[in-house]
Amino acid sequence: MRSRELRRWLAEEDERQLEPLWQRADEVRRAHVGDEVHLRARCDFSNYCVRQCTYCGLRAGNRTLTRYRLGEGEILASAAQAARLGYGTIVLQSGEDLGYDAAWLGGIVRRIKDETPLAVTLSVGERDEAELAAWREAGADRYFMRFETSNRELYRRIHPARPGRATDRVALLERVRALGYQVGSGIMVGIPGQTIEDLAGDLELLAGLDLDMIGVGPYVPHPTTPLGLQPAAPSPAQAPATALMTFKVLALTRILCPRAHLPVTNAVATLDPIAGRELGLRRGGNVVMPDLTPLRYRRHYEIYPGAAGAGEPPEKAHAQLSAGLARLGRPAGVGRGDALGAAADPATRGDP
């Protein structure tokens, strides 16, 4: 799909005109990854972070946030619960927390692999290659790290580098792949200052990276962050941070990357709590990530406020998810839901 076509779909606001896009994305999803919806439990095990990202409530400069770090037993309990509920993966997610060492997290990964059938995905930010190698050696299967935006100047504004360290997430993703991980990345939709042209560039970059997993989620403002306190002045060129725009990007991602696993993110369900998850699954998504972080910690993992389902016990959330999948006629995936390979094979791409 050419850049001009991407921009045309991204600019389209008429739901009736968007029907062919939704239909094509759903057809591509069915043909390449099937009807199964893979369930990947998420455990947000630490909200400490050394970064000063201007959009994120976990940023180091947020003095109003109660910080926490789960113990090994709490993380293992979440993993055991994920296995009991029939999920195929646990995603261990944290801020960029330098307060634990590689051996500690590696030990937890090793125990999860020894004691459960789960695949383990790590999403812990930019880490040294020695740490990444140690976690891979311990048994971690996947690594997820968004590049957020292909616009380098916009990225620098929202995601300043740590002092003395250059940031190149695309290059780091390539090193992660070389270590043998299945690799995931993604983008944020509607960042203040982001344009439709930027989003088209994001989609082209996603298509070229041959990713196994791709996360597409909307920007949701946090009131204590620099972007929340001083939002960019309104601009006619601004890409809106809406559920509709997110669905368009998700659908186009499915068409461009037909064999990638695409989660319907919690942020979409936060913007549209009634139909967000269902619409995402109808428009290219094939993964849902239930939150198995212990309830007493969830409100403190506040990248943005008001996250959908933050107060729901895992068993209740699982029952609701199962009922929703049944209504859609989509079975829950069985097993780990590993990468399908050749996510960006040009021969498999299509146009809506």
Image: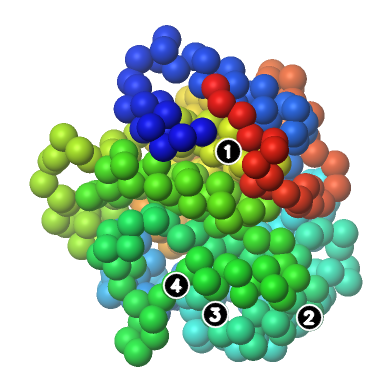
Instruction: Please name which of the two marks, 3 or 1, marks the residue nearer to the observer.
Output: 1
CA separation, marks 4 and 3? 12 Å
Q: Which label is found at residue 127? A: 3
Q: Quadrant of residue 112?
A: bottom right
CA separation, marks 3 and 1? 29 Å
Residue 270 location, x and y as percent? 43, 39
Q: Give the mark nearest the N terminus, 1 or 2.
A: 2
Does any portion of residue 306 appear in the rendered image?
Answer: no
Q: Which label is found at residue 184? A: none
Outermost residue toward the left in this view: 233
> Could you tell me which secondary element the residue under label 2 belongs to?
helix
CA separation, marks 1 and 2? 32 Å
Tell me if mark 4 has few (under 14), some (14-19) or many (20+) residues whose alpha carbon lies within 10 angstroms of its own.
few
- Residue 176 in the figure: left or right of residue 167: right
Tell me if mark 2 has few (under 14), some (14-19) or many (20+) residues whose alpha carbon lies within 10 angstroms of its own.
some
Q: Which residue is mark 1?
A: 256
Q: Which residue is mark 2?
A: 137
Q: Which residue is mark 4?
A: 168
| Depicted 279 relative to depicted 302: above or below | above
| Depicted 81 relative to depicted 96: above or below | above
> Could you tell me which secondary element the residue under label 1 belongs to?
helix
CA separation, marks 2 and 3? 15 Å
Q: 255 or 243, which is in the foreground? A: 255
Under mark 1, the amino acid is Leu
